[in-house]
Amino acid sequence: MSETTDPGICAITRDARLSPEKARQVASQIRGLNVETAKAKLLAVPRKSAGVILKTLNSAVANAQHNHESEPGQLVVREAIVGQARSLKRFIPKARGSAGAIRRRSCHIKIVLSS
């Protein structure tokens, strides 16, 4: 992850039950956008990851208002990072007594705002 100058204006969602690859596709759409534009774009995306990222964005905005007295209209999404978390390993029966592995992936979502 990249180093930030002000790590205080951020929100992190840990162990979200989403595939990191699918969440990265949505997170890349809001990088560099104004907060209001990012919220509107996330509301229009019909994916499960959009709802989780929107919830994390709302938490970051609330942190900025409460801890730094920032105005929501002045905030910009500086970083939207999706990292891989642990995977649940499951097995499904296959032909002739063998087993097929299933990896249920999860991710960590971090959103950093700047004014």
Image (tube, rainbow, N blue to C red):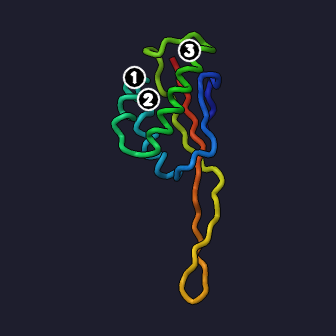
On the rendered structure, is 90 left or right of 29?
Answer: right
Mark 3 and mark 2 in contact? Answer it, CB < 8 Å. Answer: no
Residue hosting label 1: 36
Q: Amino acid at mark 3?
A: Gln
Q: Earlier in the sequence, mark 3 or mark 2?
A: 2
Q: Quadrant of the rendered structure where residue 16 is?
A: top right
Q: Quadrant of the rendered structure where residue 101 is?
A: bottom right
Element assignment for label 2: loop
- Between circles 1 and 2, the one closer to the viewer is 1
30, above or below 61, in the image = below
Element assignment for label 1: helix
The answer for how far apart the CA atoms under marks 1 and 2 are is 12 Å
Q: Amino acid at mark 1?
A: Glu
In the depicted view, which residue is nearer to us: 28 or 105?
105
Residue hosting label 3: 65
Q: Residue at left 40%, top 23%?
A: 36
Q: How dense is the environment of label 3, judged by Cα within 10 Å: few (below 14), some, or many (20 and up)?
A: some
Task: Indicate which disc residue 32 carries.
Answer: 2
